[in-house]
């Protein structure tokens, strides 16, 4: 397992960059309707604000600028997305991500929470 210890920083960097870029693309889809079946939301709406957060925080996380606060905001945004749009407080089988299609929101929430909590500054803010 020493091999894995040696690539710890590189694997975290890859996780941070790819997750940030994928998240920012969701923002592009929401804001501009690019490669999306849905039209762009109304300016100033909750969905529009979510798209702005996804685009900005995703790019900040990917490039390593204000990584931890951006990841914390992104994590909270995805918690709201899961609860409000996927689970919808339905106390039935709709709670489960496989049923309510909230897997991505839940995974983004947890990954960004991990990135926000990670205290290794050389991996988070300098890379």
Image (cartoon, rainbow, N blue to C red):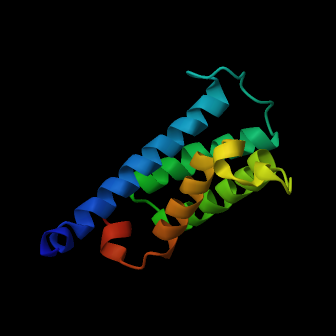
Name above or below for residue 34 compared with residue 75: above
* Image coords of residue 9 (percent x, y): 25, 67
Question: Looking at the rendering, which quadrant does residue 44 occupy?
Answer: top right
Q: Locate residue 79, reporting x and y percent.
A: 69, 59
Quarter of the rendering occupied by the C terminus: bottom left
Looking at this view, is 5 or 13 the one in front?
Answer: 5
> Taking 9 as reference, is 63 above or below it?
above
- The answer, for residue 63, to whether it is visible in the render is no
Quarter where residue 2 is shown: bottom left
Residue 12 lies left or right of residue 7; in this view the side is right
Instruction: Look at 72% across and 44% down and name the residue there.
Output: 100
Give left or right: position of 29 versus 124: right
Examine the rendered structure and indicate whether residue 68 appears above or below residue 96.
Answer: below
Q: Which residue is found at the position 23% from the left and 61% from the top?
A: 10
Looking at the image, the residue that sits furthest to the right is 90
Q: Is residue 92 visible in the rendered structure shown here? A: yes
Q: Residue at x 70, y 23 (%)?
A: 38
Q: Is residue 110 left or right of residue 98?
A: left
Residue most extreme to the bottom: 119
Q: Position of residue 55 (x, y in %)?
A: 56, 43
Which quarter of the image is occupied by the N terminus? Answer: bottom left
């Amino acid at each position: 397992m020493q091999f894995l210890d040696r690539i710890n920083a590189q694997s975290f960097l890859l996780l941070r960059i790819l997750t940030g870029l994928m998240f920012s693309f969701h923002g592009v889809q929401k804001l501009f309707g690019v490669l999306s079946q849905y039209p762009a939301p109304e300016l100033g709406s909750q969905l529009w604000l979510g798209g702005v957060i996804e685009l900005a925080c995703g790019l900040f996380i990917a490039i390593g600028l204000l990584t931890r606060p951006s990841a914390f905001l992104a994590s909270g945004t995805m918690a709201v997305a899961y609860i409000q749009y996927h689970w919808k407080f339905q106390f039935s089988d709709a709670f489960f991500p496989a049923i309510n299609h909230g897997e991505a929101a839940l995974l983004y929430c947890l990954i960004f929470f991990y990135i926000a909590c990670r205290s290794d500054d050389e991996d988070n803010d300098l890379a």
